[in-house]
Image (spheres, helix red, strand yellow):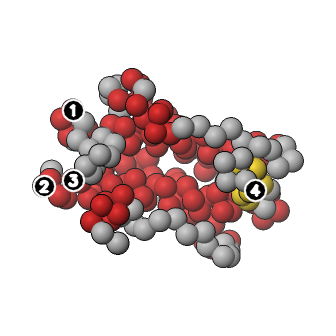
Amino acid sequence: MNDLEKKRFPIGPFEAPENICDTTLDTYIKVIKDFPGRLKNLIEHFTDDQLDTPYREGGWTVRQVVNHLADSHINSFIRFKLALTEDNPTIKPYNEAQWAELQDSYHMPVKPAMRMLKGTHQRWVTLLKSLTNKQFERTFQHPEHNRSYNLRESLALYVWHCNHHFAHIENLKKEKGW
C-alpha cells in the first residue's frame, strides 16, 4: 500500500466479517454509542483553519468529513429502519462526494453536524439494543452494488466507517502536531 492509499484507508479497506457473533455485535454497538463523544474529544479545540485542512492532498477537509459522517450515519439509520419495516427494501443511494461539496458541508460550523451525530447515534443504539438475532438478519437491497445487505454486515460497515474517518482526522492531527 503506497502513501496515498495509507492516507485514504488508514485502517485498511472494509472487509466484511464472515461471522458476527453476539459478543461482536455488543462491541459494534459500543463503538456506535461512543463514537460521537470520541469525535468531539478529537476535534473540540480545532480552529476554523484546522477544520478547513484536508486530511490528505486532494481529500476532504476535516469540516467536510464531520458533515459527511452526519449525512452518512443518518442515511444508515434510515436504512436500518427500512429493513426492519419492509421486506428487503431498495434503498436510495446518494452521491456522497457531491454532498460533501454542498455549502452546508463545506462552510458551516461543525456543531450542528456533531449534534446530529449525537442524536442519531443515541437513537441508533437504542434501536440496535432492541433487535433480536432474527431482526439482525433483515436485509435491504443496494441498487449500486446489486446485492442485499443484512443488518449485521451493515453495522460492521458503519463501525469501520466510524474508525476509518476518525483515523483520517487523528492521523492529520498527529502529522500537523496539533
Q: Residue at x 37, y 49 (%)?
A: 39
Q: Earlier in the sequence, mark 4 or mark 1?
A: 1
- Front residue of 120/12: it is 12
Place of residue 142 in the rendered image (x, y in percent of width and height, measured from the top left): 70, 49
Location of mark 4 (residue): 148
What's the residue type where badge 2 is placed? Answer: Gly
- On residue 173, the disc is 3
Q: CA distance from mark 1 to mark 2?
A: 16 Å
Q: Residue 136 falls in which quadrant of the image?
A: bottom right
Q: In percent of the image, x 30 and y 41: which residue is there? A: 61
Check residue 137 in the rendering and tell me which mark sits there, or answer none.
none
Q: Is residue 56 visible?
A: yes
In contact (CB < 8 Å): disc 2 and disc 3: no
Residue labelled with disc 1? 48
Q: Amino acid at mark 4?
A: Ser
The reply to whether dot 3 and dot 4 touch (C-beta < 8 Å) is no
Mark earlier in primary sequence (4, 2): 4
Residue at the spot x=35%, y=25% of the render? 108
Q: Position of residue 150 (x, y in %)?
A: 73, 59
Residue 113 pos. (x, y %)? 43, 33
Q: CA distance from mark 4 to mark 2?
A: 43 Å
The quadrant in which residue 27 appears is bottom right
* Badge 3 element: helix
- At mark 1, the secondary structure is helix
Q: Residue at x 35, y 29 (%)?
A: 106
At label 1, counting other C-alpha atoms closer than 10 Å, the crowd grade (few under 14, some 14-19, many 20 or more) is: few
Q: Which residue is mark 2?
A: 177
Look at the numbered disc 2 and give the secondary structure of its residue: loop
Query: Where is residue 48 drawn, in percent x and y?
Result: 21, 32
Image quadrant holding the N terminus, namely bottom left
